[in-house]
Amino acid sequence: MSAFSDPYDPNRKLGVACNCGKHASQVEHDSSDDLACADPEVLSNRVIESTMVRALFPHDETRRRFIRAVGVNTAMAAIAGVLPIGAMQALAQERKSLAKTELKIGFIPITCATPLIMADPLGFYKKEGLKVTLNKTAGWALIRDKMLNKEHDASHFLSPMPLAISMGVGSAAQPMRVATIQNINGQAITLHIKHKDKRDPKQWKGFKFAVPFDYSMHNFLLRYYVAEHGLDPDRDIQIRVVPPPEMVANLRAGNLDGYLGPDPFNQRAVYDEIGFIHILSKELWDGHPCCAFGVSDQFIKENPDTFAALYRAVLSAARMARDPKNRSLIAKVISPANYLNQPETVVEQVLTGKFADGLGNVKNVPDRADFDPFPWHSMAVWIMTQMKRWGYIKGDVNYKQIAEQVFLVTEAKKRMAELEMKSPATSYAKFKVMGKEFDPAQPEKYLGSFAIKKAAA
Amino acid sequence: MIKSEALRAGILSLMFLLVLLGIWHVATLPKEQAASANDEYAKLMGKGAVKTTGFPTPAQLGETALKHISDPFYDKGPNDKGIGIQLGFSLARVGLGFALAALVAIPLGFVIGMSPLIYRALDPFIQVLKPISPLAWMPLALYTIKDSSISGIFVIFICSVWPMLINTAFGVAAVRREWLNVAKTLEVNAVRKAFQVILPAAAPTIMTGMRISMGIAWLVIVAAEMLVGGTGIGYFVWNEWNNLSLTNVIFAILTIGLVGMLLDLVFGRLQNLVTYVE
């Protein structure tokens, strides 16, 4: 019996008769112009049907008698009722044409990367037919270089990085894209325990702070925060770039007075009794983006199907991560040495929002960290206003064009619709940062409203 | 007499070790922790639980070492492998970088050593390139080579090439005139002269250069792997630094020291093999 024959045809002997296997004889095959011969989808479905029907009726004669007796449609319905043929066919379809299934993805061991990390142990990549190797990477400069060198197919990024790389700021220009935002909120300013009485930023003159990278939300939020309190971040304090995993060790050694860093390293400083959490980044801008999931433009063009599958895997993970019920489980699967390499209780405090603040209080902030994947264009515009404010980019910036090129909103909407996730109707929204409204339609006016900024060259 | 001196030195070494362990043990005795009024806060701070942080006692270190040594080849994914596998990666990188360096340095050293003119012409370049730290090469290597693992090997190559080059050149240049003159009178051809007169004569110096280079390569690999990450004993140190786990870091340091000593012993033996008495 040929796997490609219609198993519901009572007049058909299920045996090899022609080349393609769809016809009773080679003559019939040659005279046929049946397009189904060439359609892999129809053939794939046929294979599944045949296999299952053959399993039900090992003897061809029995099968033919059964189908003649009850009629084709009844037989199909009856068999489909017993066997999950439709589901099997759908499953086989999903895997049909991924040209590239083995992917290398880079990440920094921080909770910002939760969706793309958890997708590995919880099987979201596997479900999309992808075989992903997650490479722990030593710092953001290396993340950038490994993406530029194509050692990684996709990567965990700080959300300003793809903008900077696409513009060729701080690196060779290469079109980089933000597929999803990984996390919103989830950062904090941590200070050394010896500064527990200096809670007013005006007392911070001469402090040494760390941020993970120049092109990071951490850098822009820390600068924004101290500037709102009247300090010039370029003159009154020192801001250094320190890879997140090394922040706690430097804080202990006294090299730093504090940092605006990613978790779990804020909570880790508390756990090790070195620092305390001064303020959560959520209190500066509730809903701010932090890290992103990005790929190069070239990768999208060369592997559109793989990209779509990867997109769905990360979005599904983000959907699971958004539900507070799942946070303890997620903390458990991402804490081991292969991923974050942190004590589970530290990660759990970050994700559930019930945490010790380092000053003797237990706080309960359920939305301390969240994982809204939608890549708002307005976020990109805000990031560029801050890049210009602090002199990372100069001259005229076409905010809208760059934002829309780098943050893939259309693609995000499409993939979210496939997964029945809700996405907002617009990609620009006004929001407030420390009580001051930002209107994405007027970036230059917003920029002009700040008293403290780097003098334009 | 010699035997008893070796014995006495051994006993003295052992006593040093015991004193060191004793001081270490006393210095790291666990302190009584003040009971916190707030139980929930204490729990979130990990009080009562075994923390990975802090300086370990000798017993804790022994326990960790036993755990690593009893299962050296486990593989729990790309970022968590046993100490044996990590050492294997590091040794493979060192071996490759070192072999490449030897392939370049020894023939080039021969040429430089035989020609005073070339020696003088190349000397300024060698003097400038020699003292550059391995980590300073890394950004340049990553940018031009565009591959992090090859960059790691390149950095080992570039750091271990100089001692071999200089020693080979020096050894070749210092071959005794009389021997070369004898070769000349016997009308030995150039290839035979190189392999049967100069090479054996310069071999001890070349081997010293190789020994120094191997030491440097082993120093460099740890730094390079901490920077590039992924695999290797340097990555292991970095990953445990992330976790602020001093116990694992100290274990890794001891392992690095032991392996470095073994490598040096091997080259010491090789050196003895080629040494001759005039």
Image: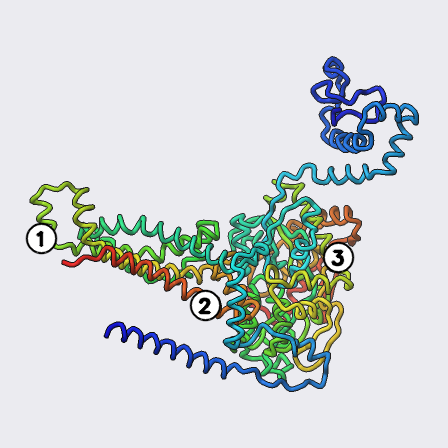
Name the one closer to the observer, A394 or A429: A429
Find disc 1 in the rendering and name its residue: B178
Identify which residue, A195 or B233, lies in the foreground.
Answer: B233
Q: Are marks 3 and 2 in contact (CB under 8 Å)?
A: no
* Residue of label 3: A320
Q: Amino acid at mark 1?
A: Glu
Q: Quadrant of the N terminus of chain A?
A: top right
- Amino acid type at mark 3: Met
Give the residue pinned by disc 2.
Answer: B253
Q: Residue furthest left?
A: B185
Residue A457 percent across, percent down from the top left? 52, 63
Judge if badges 1 and 3 mark residues of a common chain. no
**What x and y, as percent, mark residue B181?**
9, 49
Vertical position of residue A348 compared to residue A51: above or below = below
CA distance for labels 1 and 3: 82 Å
Q: Indicate the secondary structure of the residue bearing disc 1.
A: helix
Dot 2 amino acid type: Ile
Rendered location of residue A300, percent (x, y): 63, 44
Crowdedness near tag 1: few (<14), some (14–19) or many (≥20) residues, C-alpha within 10 Å:
few
Query: Which residue is most to the right?
Result: A70
Q: Judge whether A9 appears above or below A392 on screen.
A: above
- Asked whether, in this view, residue A416 is left or right of residue B153, the answer is right
Whether residue A150 sits left or right of residue A50 in the image: it is: left
Q: Chain of mark 3?
A: A
Q: Chain of mark 1?
A: B
Locate residue B91, reporting x and y percent.
Answer: 42, 56
Tell me if I can see residue A54 in this picture: yes
